[in-house]
Amino acid sequence: MQTVFSIAVDALAYGMVLFVISIGLSVTMGLMRVVNLAHGAFAMIGGYIASYAARDLGLGYAVAVLLAVVGTVLIAIPVERFLYRRIYGAPELTQVLMTIGITFCIIGIANFAFGPTLKTIPLPEALRGSVDLGFRSIATHRLFAIVCGLVVAAALWVLIERTAFGIKLRAAVDNAAMAAALGVRTEIIYAVSFAVAIGLAAFGGVVGAELLPVEPYYALRYMVTFLVVVSVGGAGSIPGALMACLLLGAIDTTGRYLAPEYGEFFFYLAVIVIVILFPRGLAGRFK
Amino acid sequence: MKKLVTATIAAVIFSSAAYADTIKVGVVGPFSGPFALQGKNFKAGIDAFFALNGNTVGDDTIEVIYRDVPQADPAQSKALAQELVVKEGVQYLAGFYFTPDAMAATPILEQGNVPMVVMNAATSAIVTKSPYVVRTSFTTWQTSTPIAKVAKDAGVTKVISLVSDYGPGVDAENAFKAAFEKVGGQVVEAIRMPLSTNDFSPIMQRVKDSGAEGVFAFLPSGPTTLGFVKAFNENGLKDGGIKLFAPGDLTQESDLPALGDAALGVQTTFHYAVSHDSPENKSFVEAAQKAIGNPAELSFPSVGAFDGMYVISKMIEATGGEQDAAKAVEAVKGLSWTSPRGPVTIDPESRHITQNIYLREVAKADDGTYYNKEIQTFENQGDPGLAAAK
């Protein structure tokens, strides 16, 4: 019984880390309909900025997180203006080629600027060490990641479903021409949602850095995992992404405990089954 | 087609005698991509050799030609090795970070009359694939065997083995198991983890449930070692008195700044630590750090490359710059010298390097950096893997 609880806690923590990193991709793919393969690259930029701020400049963790999010968004603004704006509404293949190209450029630049070694983000005293849950101990930063995941999920849901901005965004996505005719500034709406998605990527990159360490190949190494989460959850759905992360986290963690020699077999088996049963993902909302 | 290749190779061989004053060495390694750091170390080791010894042997000049195989890719490695031999007319092949890459290139050697000096690839069997293979790195068997004795001496009798699920990982598991059972220990469980594992918590739970007193771990150096060591500490294994034993891949110097306090006190066995205290190593490290640019990036492949170049220079000396693979390999069999890592010998029978294996502990230097501190020496270790394979 203790083992079951123990695995459940691990699964929850792993799932939430996946969620924080992948949710931004779900927003770009589902709401903006851009297959953004460079998502991991932006998460990585966030990680690098936080690492530089916290380790080399000696700033606090909270400041580093803030700098990472703001800095990544600032870097992303010209990229959106000059590159992404051309591919909104373009065929998927064009988007894939463009964004994978951006990914390789970012990998090259990161490798050149920061070198190929691992970069860590020093945690503040409060997040170091472990917390005793009674039946086991768990790293404090994992609890922090769980909380971050829940807060992000709630905030995004409110933003998209309950605010005027969310209504405009959904309108612009469904029919850009009509929304524009009704006076919605679609360009600004797109730019803001892109910034939000990138900011979430950077945030996820920092919060998840203990599990997925920051190095130049980060952008490619975890790309498949992020895409799987989005396709299983249903692009653009926040509850869907949350469900997908918890489910996949649970399957992956249990598989790794019971039969590590099978590798990712159970993970991808689950993905295949879910995609066959729900071709649009667990909570896909668009055709 | 085969005839044509043979004819081309023959033509190259005969014509190369005319250019005997420049001897080309083809180095195949990962110079871009996720393993670029290791390729950079190859290059630093070679550059350090030239900086300390010059690039001439007698009146011959050595010229190194690099070819990039970013990830383990036997087909590409073979194609590049063939191109080096046929088109570039190299007299020596060297480098090879991954075992499959080295294995794939061995059939070319006899046909092309070219010796191969393996500077890293660590599977025991490579040297058996061709009589022209010489290795100056280490094998996973060689570095994993002594840690079994260390574990036993620390009073641990029940160990759980955790290795990455690929060739070298399986080698490490077998090596440790053989050595540990020999000294009376017991491997209670052997788990092979997928290479792509990010979250090691469930595996640490398995360790707890197994009731083992110690963990033997092998992971390839790089990003995953960080997650592994952290999971080991955070799941309360370290505080629970469970000891961690591993070959030195887990704490390679270039990963140490990231591992930091988490790795403090971890004991590993390996053939080379950048901190090794000897005059030879001091001048090597100085030259290699200059060559690599960032001193923190220097780690073990550089010493394999440095000694590889030493062996090649001896081969050139013995053959007087003529292309004669058999004579070149014969000349270095039994060759002994003092490497930056300590006294080494090329075993005449296996053509693999016999060397000291050191027990090291991750320690913090006065300037706040982390290093592998050597605390015990296992002298003149051969490769137990070959004996086990027979």
Image (cartoon, helix red, strand yellow):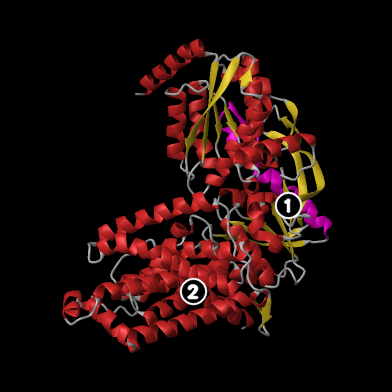
**Amino acid type, label 2:** Gly
Is residue B285 rendered magenta in the image?
no
* Residue A207 visible, this orientation: no
Q: Which residues are magenta?
A: B125-154
Helix, strand or loop at label 2? It is: helix
Q: Check the picture and name the quadrant holding the N terminus of chain A.
A: bottom right
Is residue B130 rendered magenta in the image?
yes
- Label 2, label 1: how far apart the Cα atoms are: 36 Å
Q: Check the picture and name the quadrant holding the C terminus of chain A.
A: bottom left
**Amino acid type, label 1:** Tyr
| Residue B80 as seen in the image, left or right of residue B208 | left
Q: Nearer the viewer, mark 2 or mark 1?
A: 1
Q: Which residue is depicted at the point 64% across and 24% down? A: B54
> Label 1: chain?
B
Asked if residue B195 is positioned above or below residue B2 in the image, the reply reads below
Asked if residue B61 is positioned above or below residue A249 in the image, the reply reads above
Q: Which residue is mark 2?
A: A249
Image coordinates for residue B67, horizontal then vertical, percent: 48, 34
Helix, strand or loop at label 1? It is: strand
Residue placed most toward the observer, B325 or B39: B39
Image coordinates for residue B173, horizontal then vertical, percent: 65, 53
- Res A189 label: none
Q: Residues within 10 Å of mark 1 (few under 14, many from 20)?
A: many
Q: Which residue is depicted at the point 64% across and 14% down? A: B58
Q: Which residue is mark 1?
A: B371
Q: Quadrant of residue B97?
A: top right
> Label 2: chain?
A
Q: Quadrant of residue A173?
A: bottom left
Outermost residue to the top:
B18
